[in-house]
Image (cartoon, grey):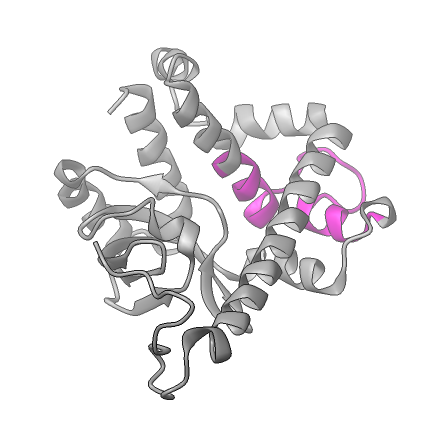
């Protein structure tokens, strides 16, 4: 476990100043901005859920669970409540990032419906962050380093591209070696994760990775479907 920098200790940036007189305020501002962006995402997901329930149900049936059989669906429904909570977040984020509502006249992209909703009253930062969802693909990463309550680093399982994420809360969720599907988001403070998490246990990575290497534009569909099958089996 890494040492957490205290207020009166030297700042780890190397300036020679105390942490409280140097980078601590910047960290606080970044955390406040991150919380504001997450609030925007939560508001957007709640709004789309309440305004387009029937369309979401159809999308879940035809797209999200389109390749999941009846026994697997029952397994997902009976999963641990914590896993079900992760499932619901993953579902709604994927809907907003890549989904379309079949049969809906006019604009049928949930993301654009959200951005056009005046009653949501999203601020500029929240709007920019939500809009970014459609440009940031879901990818499989391996956690290569983790400083608990500080940050963590991941590496793309296919391209080996590294990303360091300064996130005290998220850093407590991972251990080095964990393999997870994430959507990496660019902010003024650096990289952060969007909120969706697809944990893939190590024994299954060797089977999934070749499928993703050959997936092309089906990458996210293959990753989400594989994860759903693991959830169904309570892995």
> Which of the image's four quarters has the C terminus?
top left
Tell me the residue at 75%/53% (across/down): 115
How many numbered discs, if any?
Answer: 0
Q: Is any atom of residue 157 visible in this view?
A: no
The magenta span reads: 90-117
Query: Of all residues shown, which one is farthest toward the front?
Result: 8
In this rendering, position of residue 10 left or right of residue 160: right
Where is residue 182 drawn, in percent x and y?
A: 39, 51
Tell me the residue at 54%/23% (across/down): 61
In this rendering, position of residue 187 left or right of residue 10: right
Tell me the residue at 19%/53% (across/down): 176
In this rendering, position of residue 115 left or right of residue 5: right
Depth check, front residue: 126 or 2: 2
Where is residue 62 drawn, in percent x and y?
A: 53, 27
Depth check, front residue: 197 or 5: 5
Q: Is any atom of residue 91 visible in this view?
A: yes
Where is residue 212 drawn, in percent x and y?
A: 28, 50
Q: Is residue 164 above or below residue 225?
A: below
Q: Is residue 63 above or below residue 81?
A: below
In this rendering, position of residue 59 left or right of residue 144: right
Asked if residue 228 lies in the magenta stretch, the reply is no
Report which quarter residue 105 is drawn in: top right
Asked if residue 112 lies in the magenta stretch, the reply is yes
Depth check, front residue: 29 or 5: 5
Report which quarter residue 167 is drawn in: bottom left
């Amino acid at each position: 476990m890494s040492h957490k920098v205290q207020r009166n200790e030297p700042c780890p940036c190397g300036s020679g100043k105390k942490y409280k007189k140097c980078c601590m305020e910047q960290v606080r501002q970044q955390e406040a901005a991150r919380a504001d962006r997450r609030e925007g995402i939560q508001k957007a997901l709640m709004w789309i859920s309440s305004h387009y329930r029937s369309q979401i149900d159809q999308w879940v049936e035809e797209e999200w669970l389109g390749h999941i059989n009846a026994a697997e669906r029952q397994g997902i429904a009976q999963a641990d409540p914590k896993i079900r909570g992760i499932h619901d977040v993953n579902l709604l984020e994927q809907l907003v990032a890549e989904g379309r509502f079949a049969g809906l006249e006019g604009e049928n992209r949930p993301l654009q419906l959200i951005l056009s909703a005046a009653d949501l009253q999203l601020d500029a930062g929240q709007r920019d962050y939500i809009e970014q969802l459609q440009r940031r693909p879901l990818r499989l990463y391996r956690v290569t380093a983790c400083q608990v309550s500080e940050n963590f680093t991941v590496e793309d399982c296919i391209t080996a591209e590294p990303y360091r994420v300064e996130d005290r809360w998220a850093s407590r969720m991972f251990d080095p070696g964990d393999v997870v599907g994430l959507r990496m988001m660019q902010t003024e403070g650096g990289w952060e994760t969007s909120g969706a998490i697809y944990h893939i246990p190590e024994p299954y990575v060797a089977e999934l990775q070749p499928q993703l290497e050959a997936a092309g534009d089906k990458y996210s569909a293959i990753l989400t479907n594989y994860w759903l099958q693991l959830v169904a089996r309570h892995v």
